[in-house]
Image (spheres, rainbow, N blue to C red):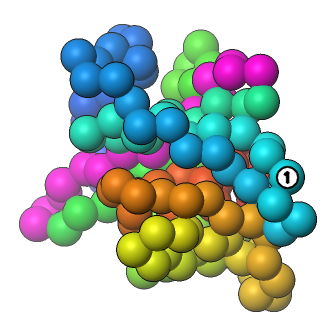
Amino acid sequence: MKHLLVASLLIVLGPSLSASLIPPLKVDILDAQERKQGRALIYPNFIELTDLSGNLRGAIGVVMAQGRVQLFLVRSDQERRLIGWAENYRLYNTEDQLVGYYYWTAIWSYVYDPQMKKVGQAQCLAYQGVCAAGIAGYLLGLL
């Protein structure tokens, strides 16, 4: 079932993850000391995650499956492989192991490791839940 969902996500994201008519909202990804670590590019249907040099590292998108919304992280390499998924403020790797937690308010999104130690944040002003899960994947090392 996950493979079907991943295929759906890759179709949603298309051959070029950046293909969009609307310019993205750019959000800095900060570590726990508030140092910039990367950037989230927020599009209407997905979020791309880049490193400090602007290199695309991965993306997170929403897939509707069996009446439920699911979030999947995809690495932006040649294979575009599934690297994790998010649900109920928790981030998991492909082996269904808990990687960490994410939480958001109207302005800020926060990321915590499995021991609930804060690892970073971003000022996600749009698409907050998906943005929070995406920055969690970035800061917790899935990308």
In this view of the protein, which residue sits in the foreground, 1 or 13? 13
Res 74 seen here: no
x then y, percent, for residue 43: 34, 35
Find out whether residue 62 is within the magenta segment.
yes
Q: Is 63 rendered above or below residue 104?
A: above
Instruction: Look at label 1 and name its amino acid.
Output: Arg
Res 125 seen here: yes
In the image, taking residue 51 as reference, residue 56 lies left or right, namely: left
Residue most toward the bottom? 115
Find out whether residue 113 is within the magenta segment.
no
In this view of the protein, which residue sits in the foreground, 79 or 20? 20
Q: Locate the C terminus and report the quarter of the image it occupies.
A: top right
Number of marks present in the image shown: 1
Residue most toward the right? 33
In the image, taking residue 51 as reference, residue 129 lies left or right, namely: left
In the image, taking residue 31 as reference, residue 107 lies left or right, namely: left
Task: Give the extent of the magenta segment.
Answer: 53-67
Assign a secondary structure to mark 1: loop
* Residue named by callout 1: 35
x then y, percent, for residue 44: 25, 39
x then y, percent, for residue 119: 80, 69
x then y, percent, for residue 142: 71, 49
Q: Going 81% across and 60% down the picture, which residue do you hit? A: 34
Q: Is 90 rendered above or below residue 73?
A: below
Q: Going 63% across and 38% down the picture, which residue do you hit? A: 39
Q: Is 98 rendered above or below residue 121?
A: below
Q: Is 76 rendered above or below residue 129?
A: above
Q: Going 55% across and 59% down the picture, which residue do you hit? A: 123
Dominant secondary-structure state across the stretch colored magenta: strand
